[in-house]
Image (cartoon, rainbow, N blue to C red):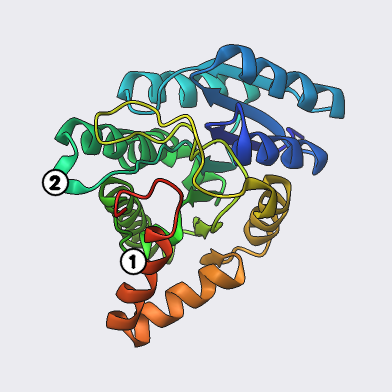
Amino acid sequence: MQKKTVFITGSSSGIGKSLAIESAKRGYNLALMARNLEALTETANECEKIGAVVFVCRGDVGLKSDCKRFIEGGIDALGRLDILINNAGISMRGLFKDTDSEVLEKLMNTNFWGTVYCTQYAMGDLLKNKGSVVGISSIAGFKGLPARTGYSASKFAMQGFLESLRCENLKTGMHVLIACPGYTASNIRKTALNSDGKTQDESPLNEKNLMSSDAVAIAVMNAIAKRRMYLILTLQGKLAVWINKLFPKLADILTYNVIAKEPNSPFN
């Protein structure tokens, strides 16, 4: 029998790389996609040492043609698709009044349209194999964050798409998971775009105190195995979602205060 497969976008670093390694440890073959071919190849090599067969595709999820090439190429190489993890994502930091609309468009193309494109091309195998489609979202998909308008908008859109997809497939056997890691040690804040569309090359947080990407990967893979609908990680993340539901005005105040205290905050 063919080994089951996991397809992961944005798998050259951070959560995506950890997901790839954790999947390999659990006996899956892998299809991996990212823009940085050198880092992607390093991830693939680590997974192959564990025993996985790995298909590598350099590409940008914001391009429909690249998503098609990734999904179809991976299925041709590995023979099947069982789990699709839409992990590729970028963030931003800047007040909306100062931000070029092209920055928001870039975030939507990567975070939202990348998820739509890959999922659409994977639907045939996902339905046939009663597989899982996963969106690595954020607490920003439940609570709009100041100075992160494009990021929150893209994650809200991703979650709306995936919730609709889940509801459409209540009787097909396909599983949909929305995973929200909370603050995780990764390079997403260093590669976040500023209001001019340039990478900020610094993190406003102490990365050493954040949840590790390996811990996130274990939690996500466990949630897939249990076919959960949602995964919200960290106490701060769970409190943010809960407070926003019950006390939205308080949530606005608390969220503003947290962002305003960041080093080099746009509110300072």
Few, some or many residues within 10 Å of mark 1 (<14, 14–19, 20+):
some
Residue tagged by mark 2? Answer: 97
* The one of 76 and 152 positioned closer to us in this rendering: 152
User: Marks 2 and 1: CB-CB under 8 Å?
Assistant: no
Amino acid tagged 1: Tyr
- Work out whether residue 2 can be spotted: yes
- In whole angstroms, how far apart are the C-alphas of marks 2 and 1? 16 Å
Q: Nearer the viewer, residue 170 or 252?
A: 252
Q: Earlier in the sequence, mark 2 or mark 1?
A: 2
The residue lying at 32 percent from left, 75 percent from top is 253
- Horizontal and vertical percent for residue 223? 64, 61
Please indicate, yes or no, whether residue 75 appears anywhere in the rendered image: no
Q: Compared to 141, does 94 lie above or below?
A: above
- Name the residue located 76 percent from the left edge and 18 percent from the top edge: 45
* Residue 68 numbered tag: none
Reading the image, the residue beneath label 1 is: 256
Q: Is residue 107 left or right of residue 173?
A: left
Q: Is residue 136 left or right of residue 249?
A: right
Picture coordinates of residue 191 (x, y %)? 46, 31
Determine which quarter of the picture holds residue 211. bottom right
Label 2: how many residues lie within 10 Å, few (<14), some (14-19) or many (20+)?
few
Q: Nearer the viewer, residue 37 or 222?
A: 37
Quick one: SS at disc 2?
helix
Which x, y percent locates residue 113?
A: 30, 37
Q: Residue at x 68, y 54 (%)?
A: 209
